[in-house]
């Protein structure tokens, strides 16, 4: 649904080139919620703004719903007719809502409909439906200043949906909201995604947002996507940075010199199995648990656990083999005896 | 001089002053508003970024702003004659007043429009709106309270300039003050004229403030101006005049201590609403 190929964006700031996007290849499937996560300055905001050409990429292509937007772009910062028409089928939600303070909630939702050239009665009807959809029908006559943050964002979402878009872009839509409100907005997005078949590309710096609504995710760092794919697969990948962030095991302790630390990832079905006690019983190993984390992603439980086994790596070949046999992904984090040597 | 003698003179002079101020303000509005908006649009990072146009426009505005009005007026004498056919009377005074008011207002427009959050323009762009849409639907409406305040300032400045124009044959209250109050030492008359000018300026300021506040306070708290605004509440006002002060407007949220979960809690969950 959304594809970017080798997308690059370079800004010129006081005579120096600053690279915001350094060859980004993004593939968002139709009907999925795709999250891009990264620290501020990673280029994720630039990426989402390049998708609807609010920001012109320096090179590379952006294709949305089969239409290559980069080809429509035209010259200079102004959008040509073709691009403007294409943008009408791409909704966008902003971190700071960007609602017009001089217009009521209803009139804010009507704005894109005015741009589309709908007549007054049709606009009224559509705006009413949209406000119903986001649960704000009773606030139609209020001004944005009278609404809470979450309500403002609901208006923002209703407005973004006015053009009946297939794609919704969300640029840190929940970052200015408290955790409770964030959850309700994410639920709304998820609900719209399911009910309208809306493809959602969202940008966030919060891991919680990714785990609670996304089907797929990408991690951005320094203008590049370092990891991407189905969220469940990503989290089940040993050594994944995203997995480490979502399922944190804490810092590696300064362990005993004669011990092996294992990071175990247990995807899906294996999560419920009591492998720790089985390991202890069948192999008579005195293991200690250093950390563990479990998340439910897309209805599947995914977890990570860090355990410490006595003895060096080569002495633990049997228990490690046993764990791998169980379908667990085992990562030997340290072999301290070798480190010391 | 008796009041009976002053009155007709005052009436004519006031009419002349209002005429030239009105004309100049109208021209300032018609030319200054687009010029101010254009100054923002053509600036670096603007929607119509255009360095040469911005430079030239900025320079013209700066020159217009920096010339003392009296010099501007004298310098424009030939131009005035060409436009209105005379260099005397309120019609003639209107020309330099307008020329002086346009850049004055344009700068104020520029400042007001610059204050509008760039995110709003971006939102309109993301909806597929053109630059013209952004100007019409966002920049001007959102800057309206400041624009009204700017216009008030402009009108008051023009009233001041108009007195100067009057002193050199432009008619109006300035002319009256000069010919009677100054040349003939009619101190009483002078006092009357001064009082009238003070009242005039105070009135303009009060009206401007009222309008600007009415526009700025949209959706923020309540006030008497709310009743003047065109909305469904006005219909209800007509039917039940006694209920106006106490009845909350339909869309006003309950300002009670709703807590952080105001969102979602107060409204039906979207899944349930369909």
Image (spheres, grey):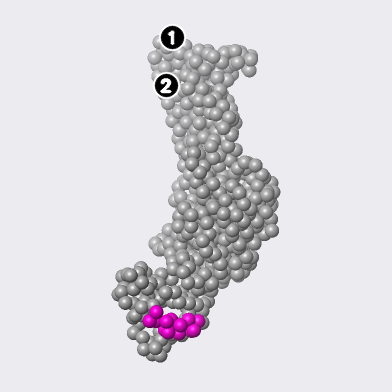
Q: Classify mark 2: residues with Cα within 10 Å, few (<14), some (14-19) or many (20+).
A: some
Q: Earlier in the sequence, mark 1 or mark 2?
A: 1
Q: Label 2's element?
A: helix
**In percent of the image, x 56 and y 67: which residue is there?**
A229
Quickly name the residue at label 2: B194
Residue B73 versus residue A286: which sits nearer the camera? Answer: A286
Q: Is residue A164 above or below residue B269?
A: above
Q: Horizontal and vertical percent for residue B83?
A: 63, 17
> What is the chain identity of the residue bearing mark 1?
B
Residue range highlighted in magenta = A314-327
Instruction: Give the quarter of the figure containing the N terminus of chain A.
Output: bottom right
**In percent of the image, x 61 and y 62: which residue is there?**
A27
Q: What is the quadrant of residue B38 in the picture?
A: top right
**Residue pushed farthest top?**
B184
In this picture, residue B50 sits left or right of residue A339:
right
Q: Is the magenta stretch mostly helix, strand or loop?
A: helix
For the residues labelled 1 and 2, the Cα–Cα distance comes to: 16 Å
**In percent of the image, x 34 and y 81: which residue is there?**
A310
Q: Is residue A316 magenta?
A: yes
In this picture, residue A56 sits left or right of residue A251:
right
Q: In this view, does A230 lie above or below A268?
A: above
Residue B135 versus residue A64: which sits nearer the camera? Answer: A64
Label at residue B183 = 1
Q: Is residue A338 above or below residue B248?
A: below
Q: Label 1's element?
A: loop
């Amino acid at each position: 649904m959304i594809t970017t190929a080798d997308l690059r964006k370079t800004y010129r700031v006081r005579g120096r080139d600053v690279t915001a996007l350094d060859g980004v290849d993004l593939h968002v499937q139709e009907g999925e919620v795709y999250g891009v996560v990264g620290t501020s300055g990673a280029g994720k905001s630039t990426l989402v703004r390049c998708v609807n050409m609010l920001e012109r990429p320096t090179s590379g292509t952006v294709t949305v719903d089969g239409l290559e937007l980069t080809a429509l772009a035209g010259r200079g910062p102004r959008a040509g007719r073709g691009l403007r028409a294409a943008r009408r089928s791409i909704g966008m939600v902003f971190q700071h809502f960007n609602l017009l303070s001089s217009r009521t909630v209803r009139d804010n939702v009507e704005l894109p409909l005015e741009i589309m050239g709908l007549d007054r009665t049709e606009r009224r009807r559509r705006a009413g439906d949209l406000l119903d959809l986001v649960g704000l029908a009773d606030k139609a006559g209020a001004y944005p200043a009278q609404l809470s943050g979450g309500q403002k964002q609901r208006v923002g979402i209703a407005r973004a949906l006015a053009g009946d878009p297939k794609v919704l872009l969300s640029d840190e839509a929940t970052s200015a909201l408290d955790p409770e409100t964030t959850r309700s907005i994410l639920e709304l997005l998820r609900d719209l995604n399911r009910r309208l078949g809306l493809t959602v590309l969202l940008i966030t710096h919060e891991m919680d947002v990714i785990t609670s609504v996304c089907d797929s995710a990408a991690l951005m760092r320094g203008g590049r996507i370092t990891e991407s794919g189905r969220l469940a697969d990503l989290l089940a990948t040993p050594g994944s940075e995203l997995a480490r962030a979502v399922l944190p095991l804490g810092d590696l302790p300064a362990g005993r010199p004669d011990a092996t630390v294992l990071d175990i990832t247990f995807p899906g079905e294996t999560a419920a199995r009591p492998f720790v006690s089985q390991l202890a019983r069948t192999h008579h190993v005195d293991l200690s648990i250093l950390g563990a984390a479990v998340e439910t992603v897309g209805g599947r439980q995914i977890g990570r656990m860090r355990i410490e086994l006595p003895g060096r790596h080569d002495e633990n070949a049997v228990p490690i083999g046993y764990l791998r046999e169980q379908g667990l992904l085992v990562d030997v984090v340290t072999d301290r005896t070798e480190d010391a040597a | 001089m008796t009041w009976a003698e002053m009155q007709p003179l005052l009436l004519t002079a006031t009419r002349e002053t209002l005429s030239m101020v009105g004309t100049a303000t109208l021209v300032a509005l018609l030319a200054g508003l687009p010029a101010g908006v254009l100054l923002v649009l053509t600036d670096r990072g603007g929607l119509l970024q255009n360095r040469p146009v911005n430079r030239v426009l900025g320079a013209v505005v700066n020159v217009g702003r920096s010339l003392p009005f009296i010099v501007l007026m004298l310098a424009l004498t030939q131009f005035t004659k060409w436009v209105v056919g005379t260099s005397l009377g309120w019609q003639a005074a209107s020309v330099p007043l307008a020329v002086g008011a346009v850049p004055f207002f344009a700068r104020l427009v520029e400042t007001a429009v610059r204050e509008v959050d760039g995110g709003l323009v971006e939102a309109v762009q993301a909806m597929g709106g053109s630059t013209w849409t952004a100007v019409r639907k966002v920049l001007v409406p959102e800057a309206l309270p400041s624009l009204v305040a700017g216009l008030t300032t402009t009108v008051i400045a023009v009233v001041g300039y108009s007195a100067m124009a009057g002193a050199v044959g432009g008619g109006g209250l300035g002319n009256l003050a000069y010919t009677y109050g100054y040349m003939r030492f009619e101190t009483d008359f002078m006092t009357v004229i001064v009082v009238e000018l003070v009242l005039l300026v105070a009135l303009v300021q009060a009206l401007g403030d009222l309008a600007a506040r009415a526009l700025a306070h949209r959706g923020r708290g309540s006030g008497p101006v709310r009743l003047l605004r065109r909305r469904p509440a006005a219909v209800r006002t007509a039917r039940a005049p006694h209920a106006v002060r106490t009845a909350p407007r339909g869309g006003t949220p309950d300002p009670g201590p709703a807590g952080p979960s105001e969102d979602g809690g107060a409204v039906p969950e979207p899944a349930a609403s369909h």
